[in-house]
Image (cartoon, rainbow, N blue to C red):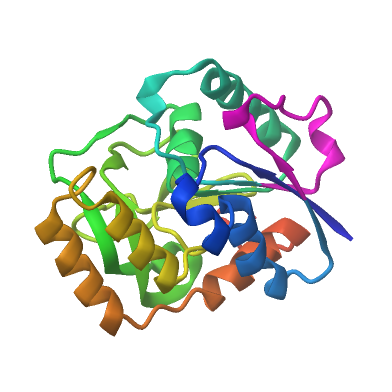
């Protein structure tokens, strides 16, 4: 059995929960086929739940996305930023998604900010050279970006819009700015839900049109994350 702790950093908009569930549900549904021996536990830090008192109670950690930015510097974020170096020192695997990608980088000295490039919503092509993967189309939903490499980490993929979109570390960890756990259906519904609020109506319509034609493949990344969580070698630079 591989014990995985999913750290919930954000909540799905309430209007979408009945149809799509919560972010940990999506992460579990994406990763479980690649890691069938896993037992998943959710710790909702965004809802006030404390981080594990004994980090080694879990074999690996997965950090979800969030509507917040790391610069919001909320108390639970400060606790999480202090917790991640403890995992690194103990060489406990971790994998971050979107906000999870950003707070991992921030915990190790990177600058994260709201990008002046604007909002990215929908499918984009990402390279994954540092993970030994071919380029592939992925689903993105963000404006904040990691602007500088973290300590003991380096770019492992991305694109012109987000050059540090994939980061690999010298300890058992890597992260992605995009959302491998999102289905196209959820992305369509989330884009529509936030049209006129977080994104313009025009942007939402363009993203939804591109989504309809997108060919998204997250299986290869799922295999990499499963290998990371099992403690297998050669899935991060320091292996």
The single residue placed furthest to the right in the displayed view is 1
Give the quadrant of residue 193. Answer: bottom left
The range drawn in magenta is: 41-61
- Viewport quadrant of the C terminus: bottom right
**Residue 56 percent across, percent down from the top left:** 83, 37
Give the quadrant of residue 139. Answer: bottom left
Residue 19 drawn in magenta: no
Number of marks present in the image shown: 0
Give the quadrant of residue 38. Answer: bottom right
Residue 53 drawn in magenta: yes
Residue at 64 percent across and 49 percent down: it is 172
For this view, does 127 lie left or right of residue 226? left
Q: In the rendered image of this protein, does residue 52 appear above or below residue 183?
A: above
Residue at 69 percent across and 34 percent down: it is 87
The single residue placed furthest to the left in the displayed view is 202
Residue at 60 percent across and 20 percent down: it is 79
Residue at 33 percent across and 49 percent down: it is 164
For the residue pair 160 and 98, the one nearer the viewer reads as 98
Q: In the rendered image of this protein, does residue 165 appear above or below residue 108?
A: below
- Viewport quadrant of the N terminus: bottom right
């Amino acid at each position: 059995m591989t014990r995985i702790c999913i750290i919930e950093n954000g909540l799905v908009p309430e209007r979408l929960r009945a149809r799509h569930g919560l972010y940990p549900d999506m992460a579990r549904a994406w990763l479980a086929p690649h890691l069938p021996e896993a037992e998943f536990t959710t710790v909702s830090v965004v809802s006030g739940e404390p981080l594990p008192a004994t980090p080694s109670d879990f074999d690996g950690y997965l950090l979800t996305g969030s509507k917040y930015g790391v610069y919001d510097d909320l108390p639970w974020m400060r606790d999480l930023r202090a917790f991640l170096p403890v995992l690194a020192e103990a060489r406990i695997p971790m994998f971050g998604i979107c906000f999870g990608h950003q707070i991992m980088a921030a915990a190790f000295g990177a600058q994260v900010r709201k990008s002046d490039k604007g909002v990215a919503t929908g499918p984009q092509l990402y390279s994954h050279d540092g993970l030994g993967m071919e380029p592939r189309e992925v689903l993105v939903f963000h404006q904040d970006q990691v602007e500088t490499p973290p300590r003991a980490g380096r770019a492992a993929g991305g694109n012109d819009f987000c050059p540090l979109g994939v980061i690999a570390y010298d300890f058992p960890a890597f992260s992605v700015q995009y959302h491998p756990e999102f289905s196209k259906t959820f992305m369509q519904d989330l884009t529509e839900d936030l049209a006129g609020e977080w994104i313009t109506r025009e942007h939402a319509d363009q993203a939804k049109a591109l989504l309809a034609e997108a060919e998204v493949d997250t299986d290869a990344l799922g295999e990499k994350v499963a290998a990371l969580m099992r403690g297998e070698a050669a899935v991060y630079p320091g292996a």
